[in-house]
Image (tube, rainbow, N blue to C red):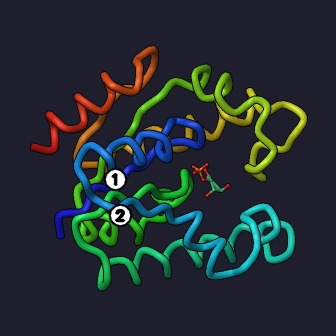
Amino acid sequence: MGNIILIGFMGCGKSTIGVKLSYRLRQPMLDTDKLIEKEEGRTISEIFETDGEEYFRNLETECIKKLISTVHNQIISVGGGLPMREENHALLKELGMVVYLRARAETIYERVKHDKTRPLLQCDDPREKIRTLMEKRAAVYEQASDVIVDVDNKDFDTILDEIVNVIE
Ligand code: S3P
């Protein structure tokens, strides 16, 4: 299908890198969080608050199912929790090449510590929450991906070059 899918923890840079990759490869970019917010007419935080996480996870699975039949040659950034559903792995692979942007918990914390838009991190100790979530997720991201790119301490141009090299 020619799609490139960016997965990874909240704050690993999927959206920013997705936009830059989109310019570099001259391919449009999509973001599952944004698609869901548009379709639902409310923010991710409102969806979590009103209908809960499970409801949101169902929307994510529906979203990538729809993309499989409609989208080609695009860059697709997916929400950080989407690969946690086992059934989504096969869907992601069907959708395109899956690139995992791997970052350490401390890098993530520095990037998201002032963020208010991610419901899972609105807690007393976000640093600890990131660590425990990362422990559960790291191996799953690796399993769900075709390619891993480490992003710690690298500027965006370096990361982009690495992605372009591995997908070519
Ligand atoms: C989530 C990541 C978010 C968003 C939601 C849940 C997660 O997307 O889908 O807040 O479970 O990791 P980003 O990874 O784009 O922040």
Q: Is residue 48 above or below residue 9?
A: below
Badge 1 is on which residue? 144
Quadrant occupied by the N terminus? bottom left
Q: Under tag 2, what secondary structure?
A: helix
Badge 2 is on which residue? 89
- Residue 42, x across and y down, in percent: 76, 73
Labelled disc at residue 90:
none
Q: Give the alpha-carbon distance from disc 1 to disc 2, as whole Å.
A: 6 Å
Q: Quadrant of residue 132?
A: top right
Q: Quadrant of residue 150?
A: top left
Q: Quadrant of residue 97?
A: bottom left
Farthest right residue in view: 124
Q: Residue at x 58, y 63 (%)?
A: 33
The answer to whether the residue bearing label 2 lies less than 8 angstroms from the nearest atom of ligand 1 is no
What amino acid does circle 1 point to?
Ala
Q: Is residue 127 above or below residue 83?
A: above
